[in-house]
Image (spheres, rainbow, N blue to C red):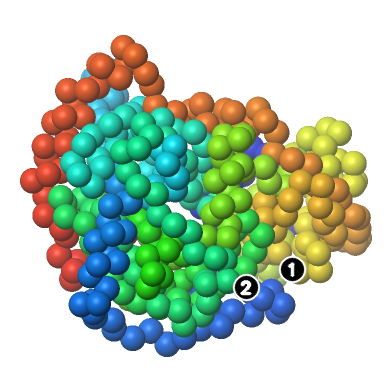
Amino acid sequence: MRAGCACLAGLLALAGGAIAPRPPGAGAAQSPSRAPTRLAASPAALPAELDPIIRRVRQSVVRVLAIHPRIEPEDQALGEPARRRAQVASGVMLDGQGHLVTTARAVAGCIAIQVRTPDGREVAGNLLGLDPVTDLALVRIPAGLVPPLPLAPAGAVQIGARVITVAQSYGSLPTQDVGRITWRYDEPRASLIQLTNVIYPGNSGGAAVDERGRLLGVVVGGLGDVQAADSLAASASARGSTFAVPVGDLVTLVDEMRRFGGVRRGFLGVSIQQGLIEDPEHPDAPAAIGVQVSDVVAGGPAWQAGLRPGDLVVAVNGVEVNSPDELMRRITTMSPGAAAELLWLRADQEHRARVLLGSTPDSVIAATLESARAPSGARRQEIEAEMQRLQRELRGLGAPPPDSSLRR
C-alpha cells in the first residue's frame, strides 16, 4: 500500500472549504437511506404577480465586498507589497441587530469587508464567525439599516416547491430568477437543496425565498464552481445546478457562529490522505481505496479507539469511504459526543472500534476566525482609498452576459 496525493494537512476537525455533496449522476455516493428525489428542471418566467414579493425581498439583500491581499509572482520577485483584489458576494439580513449571512469563501482571509445596503449606503462589516463546511459566514453591520427577511418553516423546503432567488451581482443591479427545488440532500448541519434557478457572479450568499417572501435557504453556489468570484468573465450557472443551505440548518449554524465564532463539529483527531494499493495489472496506476491515516493526535478520539499511523480506514458506520473528503464529510456532519463505528485495515487484518467523537477544538475555531477577520483602526484607514477605487470600478461593470462560461 502506498500513500498518494499530498497529505491533507491538519486535523480532521474543520474542513478547508465547503464540502458540497454532488447530486445523483455527478459522482457522489448516496446513503441508501437518503436516496434523493429529483424533479425535472424546466424554464421559469418571472410572473408579474411576484413583482411585489421580489421588491420586498430586495430590501433585505445586500452586496458584500471583501478586499483580499494578492501576491503576484512578479511582485514577489521584485519584493513589492501584495496587491489587493475584491470578491463580491450577496448577503441576507437575518435580524434587527444587523446580523447577515454570506459565503465563507468570499470573506475568509480578507483584510476588510464593506457592505452596500439596498438604498446605497456603504458600511463596514465585522466578521463574527464562519463555517467552511457549509460555506457560510456571519457578518454584522450597524443595526436598523436593513430589514430582516422572515424565515420559512423548515417543512416548507419540499421537492417541487417554487422558489425565487434574489441576489446582488458584480454590476449595480440586483438579479432574480424563479425556479423550483429539484433535489435535497439531508445530513445533520450540512444539508443542501438543489434549485433550477440561474445564478450569476456575486449571487452566492443571496436569498432563496418562497412565494410569500420567506427565506427558504441561502445560495452557496453552482455545480462546478471554483473561485467564481475571482473572474469577471464568469456568468450564469446552468439551469438546475444551483445549491442552497436550507433554512432548518441555517438557524442552527448561525446560532453557533454567533456564540462560538464557528460550528462545533465532530472531531476524530487524525491527519489523512488518499489510500492507494498497487494494481498488478496496472503497476503504474495504483487503485484508490480507503483513507490512510498519516498521523493521530495522542490521547484524541481516534487514538483511544486504537487507530495508528499507517492504518487504512475503509468504512464509517457501515458505509464505505474511499476518499479523504468522504471520511471528512461523515465525521464533520456528526455532532460532538456522537459515536462512530470505524472499520480499518492494518497489515491485512480487520479492526473495528466504536469511537466517541470529540468537538472541534476552540483553538482551531479561534485561529480560523482570527485569520479571516478584517482589521480595524489604522489598517482599515490605510486601505480605504483602495476600496473606494474598487467600488468605482465595480459600479461601472454591468451584469455579466447570460451566455458566458459556467461559474457563480
Q: Identity of the amino acid at label 1?
A: Glu
User: Mark 1 falls on what kind of element?
Assistant: strand
Which of the marked residues, 1 or 2, is nearer the chain's N terminus? 2
Residue 128 vertical placement versus 22 (above, below): above
**Residue plotted at (90% across, 41% down):** 304
Image quadrant in which the C terminus is located = bottom left
Q: Position of residue 242 (x, y in %)?
A: 39, 68
Query: Relative to the observer, which residue lies in front, 274 or 302?
Result: 302
Give the image location of residue 181, x and y in percent. 45, 76
* Mark 1 nearby-residue class (10 Å; few <14, some 14–19, many ≥20): some
The percent coordinates of residue 96 (x first, y second) are 42, 41
In the image: residue 118, left or right of residue 285: left
Residue at 40% in and 54% down: 149
Residue occupied by mark 1: 320
Q: Which mark is residue 29?
A: 2
Say if mark 1 contacts mark 2, CB within 8 Å: yes
**10 Å neighbourhood of mark 2: few (<14), some, or many (≥20)?**
some
Query: How far, Cα to Cα, is label 1 from label 2?
Result: 10 Å
Image position of 166 with respect to 120: above or below:
below
Res. 183 visible in picture: yes
> Is residue 8 placed above or below 405 in the rendered structure?
above
